[in-house]
């Protein structure tokens, strides 16, 4: 009885093996690209949410502190006035904003200043690691600033790369990147925060908010007293260019 001879075609040819390997490689490439895109999207979303969370927190602090502003024209108005030291423009802005407030916004939880009037100063500075960060200083509002104000600032966010403030000029119905009358308080303030772009060459993320300061003279009254322009006091529509506009507080 003779041995069984192997049947023809029982194995794989070299061409079949190569085709199988090519199909497997293509499948792995598709799976990897889908996985990579999912991970990158998740990372971008997480980064964006983190930036927006910090940006929203800072905006809320600005709103609370500005709407709690205090001003007394009969006693040392220079000690209660709003101050704006403008530096740069657009995403490179590094403005220094200062005003007197009665709220606890921006203050550390254990600060003794939270129980009374104090002057806040918010700016961009370098933290201990040399990174741009939002810096806050505070001191008693009647203190002699040349002698009694000292101490290091505290940093509330390293996600902000630009800080810009504008005030609404009711007399000429326009936005100004300055505030020269430091013995008074503007009625309407625009705060813009610039956050890092999600990708290297993208535009920076921008958050913008209009805040109405209740203790300031009404815009209508300021416009009428000037004897020029209209009496509306509403900012021109073209002055707010943020992707997500918000109406002035208190409307």
Image (tube, grey):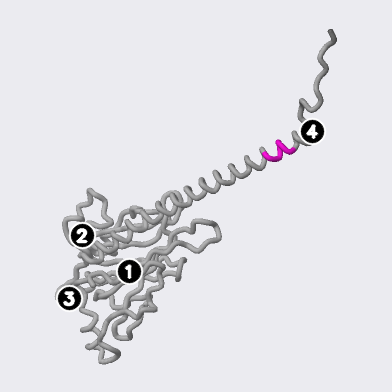
> Is 20 within the magenta?
yes
Would you name the residue on which mark 2 appears? 103
Q: Residue at x 54, y 57 (%)?
A: 200
The answer to whether marks 3 and 2 mark residues whose Cβ atoms lie closer than 8 Å is no
Extreme residue toward the left, this view: 74
Residue 14, disc: 4
Where disc 3 sits, the SS reads loop
Q: Earlier in the sequence, mark 1 or mark 2?
A: 2
Q: Nearer the viewer, mark 3 or mark 2?
A: 2
Q: Earlier in the sequence, mark 4 or mark 2?
A: 4
Quadrant holding the C terminus: bottom left
**58 left or right, relative to 113:** right
Q: Nearer the viewer, residue 123 or 24?
A: 24
The residues tagged by marks 4 and 3 sit, at their Cα atoms, a distance apart of: 94 Å
What segment carries the magenta color?
A: 19-23
Residue at 20% in and 55% down: 114
- Vertical order, 34 against 202 (above or below): above
The numbered disc on residue 246 is: 1
How packed mark 3 is, by other alpha carbons closer than 10 Å (few <14, some 14-19, many 20 or more), is few
Image location of residue 22, percent across then percent down: 71, 40
**Gap between marks 4 and 2 measured at Cα:** 79 Å
Q: Earlier in the sequence, mark 4 or mark 3?
A: 4
Q: Are marks 4 and 3 in contact (CB under 8 Å)?
A: no
Residue 123 visible here: yes
Q: Earlier in the sequence, mark 3 or mark 2?
A: 3
**Residue 175's image quarter?**
bottom left
Badge 1 marks a residue whose secondary structure is: loop
Label 1 to label 2: alpha-carbon separation: 23 Å
Classed neighbour count for the residue bearing mark 1: other residues with Cα under 10 Å, few (<14), some (14–19), many (≥20): few
Assess disc 4: are there few (<14), some (14-19) or many (≥20) residues with their C-alpha within 10 Å of its C-alpha: few
Tag 4's secondary structure? helix
Give the labeled residue for mark 3: 73
């Amino acid at each position: 009885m003779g041995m069984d001879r192997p049947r023809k075609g029982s194995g794989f040819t070299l061409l079949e093996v190569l085709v199988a390997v090519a199909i497997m490689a293509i499948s792995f490439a598709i799976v990897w690209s889908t996985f990579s895109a999912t991970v990158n999207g998740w990372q971008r979303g997480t980064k964006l949410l983190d930036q927006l969370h910090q940006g929203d927190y800072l905006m809320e602090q600005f709103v609370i502190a500005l709407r709690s502003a205090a001003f007394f024209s009969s006693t040392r108005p220079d000690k209660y006035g709003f101050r704006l030291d403008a530096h740069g423009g657009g995403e490179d802005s590094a403005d220094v904003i200062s005003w007197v407030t009665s709220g606890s916004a921006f203050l550390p939880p254990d600060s003794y200043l939270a129980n009374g009037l104090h002057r806040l100063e918010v700016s961009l500075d370098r933290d201990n690691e040399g990174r741009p960060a939002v810096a806050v200083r505070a001191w008693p509002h009647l203190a002699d600033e040349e002698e009694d104000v000292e101490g290091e600032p505290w940093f509330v966010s390293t996600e902000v790369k630009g800080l810009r403030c504008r005030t609404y000029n009711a007399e000429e119905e326009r936005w100004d990147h300055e505030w020269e009358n430091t013995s008074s308080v503007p009625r309407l303030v625009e705060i813009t925060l610039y956050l890092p772009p999600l990708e290297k060459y993208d535009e920076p993320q921008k958050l913008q908010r209009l805040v109405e300061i209740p203790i300031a003279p009404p815009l209508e009254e300021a416009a009428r007293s000037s004897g020029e322009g209209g009496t509306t006091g509403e900012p021109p529509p073209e002055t707010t260019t943020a992707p997500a506009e918000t109406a002035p507080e208190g409307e």
